[in-house]
Image (cartoon, rainbow, N blue to C red):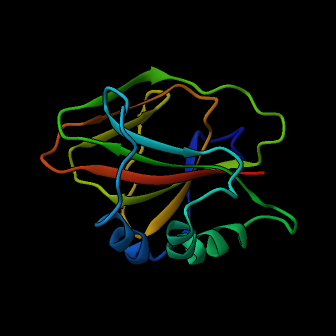
Amino acid sequence: MDLKQASWYWLCRVDPAPVVAFLEDYDWPAGGADFGEHATYPDGEDLPPELAEAAGAIFQEVLAQFPAGARRGRTHLSLIRPGRAVPHHKDGHNPHLCACVHVPLLTNPQVHFMVDQSRAVMDVGHAYVMDPGRFHSIANDGETDRVHLFFIVL
């Protein structure tokens, strides 16, 4: 599916268990955002070795869905605590962007991920492509954390 036609879509199944296990001992960076915590690894190659190992199978499975030569760029771990939200926004334009892939690691039915004016229901065990150039927002109205691993495919 082309992102010119849809603002988000399902990509493939993945096994999040190794990354979820990694998160049990993960020290979120100090001074997180108002909505929770956020760790960014700008060039995609600077992940902590334990996270790179835990997420390796996810990265391989996702990149296999793209044309040969696709590679992972900027990578994020995003935690949105219960009762917190990320305001409506769109991310800057990247002319080299092929896709932005979201992999839910922890979520709950009261997470509202809105892309344009539609709710994107993203389940654990799946990877989704999202157009970061579209307006989007996230609200965690549940009682548990929402954590996504997301990364740019170049």
Q: Residue at x 36, y 40 (%)?
A: 37
Q: Residue 61's x, y, as percent?
A: 63, 75
**20 or 1: nearer the viewer:** 20
Q: Residue at x 70, y 58 (%)?
A: 45
Q: Residue at x 37, y 65 (%)?
A: 124
User: Which residue is outermost to the right?
Assistant: 69
Q: Locate residue 107 relative to residue 98 in the image: left or right.
A: left
User: Which residue is outermost to the top?
Assistant: 88
Q: Locate residue 60 relative to residue 8 in the image: left or right.
A: right
Q: Residue 5's x, y, as percent?
A: 68, 40
Which quarter of the picture shows residue 90?
top right
**Rendered-image quadrant of the N terminus:** bottom right
Please tell me how many numbered marks the rendered image carries.
0
Q: Residue at x 61, y 27 (%)?
A: 91
Q: Is residue 25 above or below residue 33?
A: below
Q: Locate residue 24 relative to residue 41 in the image: left or right.
A: left
Q: Is residue 136 above or below residue 65?
A: above
**42 or 8: nearer the viewer:** 42
**13 or 53: nearer the viewer:** 53
Q: Residue 66's x, y, as percent?
A: 76, 64
Q: Residue 151's x, y, as percent?
A: 61, 51
Q: Is residue 62 above or below residue 113?
A: below
